[in-house]
Image (spheres, rainbow, N blue to C red):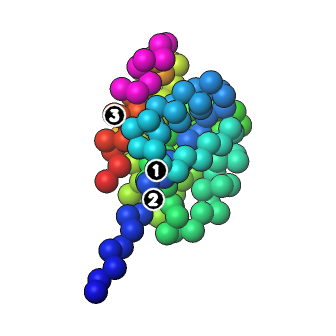
Amino acid sequence: MKVPLSQPTRSILLAEDDADDQELLSCALREIDPALDIVCITNGRKFVSYLEGVQDAQLPSLIILDYNIPELTGVEILTIINEDDRYTGIPKIVWSTSKSPVFKTMSFDMGVVDYIIKPNDIASFTEIARHMLSFIK
């Protein structure tokens, strides 16, 4: 008799220093997929250090980066992690309060799958979370 293999846990690594944005996005993501494993890290250096310490089998399914996170910006984080091939297959999203076309272009030039403007209203978080999850294979 074959025992069904369990599905690997879908996980998200979120670089976000704003506690409200962390909570709102995490709640919206878990509302869609309660089994999600979400790790939130509040500064860029700690984010890179954490990611470098993750074993290959435990790499996140999705990386979400606040553009203006302290110590290293989202683009600076991308510059560092893009140097390591083990992160190539992980979709990366930058989200920000900034509508700057320069920030958006820089993010896309670094290989992100999307640049998302943070919503001003709570209701939009679920729609954004659904869109973000669409990038997980």
Q: Is residue 117 above or below residue 76?
A: above
Is residue 113 a member of the stretch shown in magenta? no
**Sequence-wise first label, 2 or 3:** 2
Q: Is residue 61 above or below residue 99?
A: below
Count neighbours of disc 2 (C-alpha within 10 A) and say few if under 14, some if 14 to 19, many if 20 or more.
few
Residue identified by numbered label 1: 35
Residue identified by numbered label 3: 131
Residue 85, quarter of picture: bottom left
Count neighbours of disc 1 (C-alpha within 10 A) and say few if under 14, some if 14 to 19, many if 20 or more.
few
Three-letter residue code for mark 2: Thr
Q: Gap between marks 2 and 3, in whole Å? A: 19 Å
Residue 19, percent from left and from top: 66, 28
Count neighbours of disc 3 (C-alpha within 10 A) and say few if under 14, some if 14 to 19, many if 20 or more.
some
Contact (CB < 8 A) between labels 3 and 1? Answer: no
Chief secondary structure of the magenta span? helix
Q: Magenta part of the protein: which range?
A: 120-127
Q: Looking at this rendering, what residue extends furthest in the bottom direction? A: 1
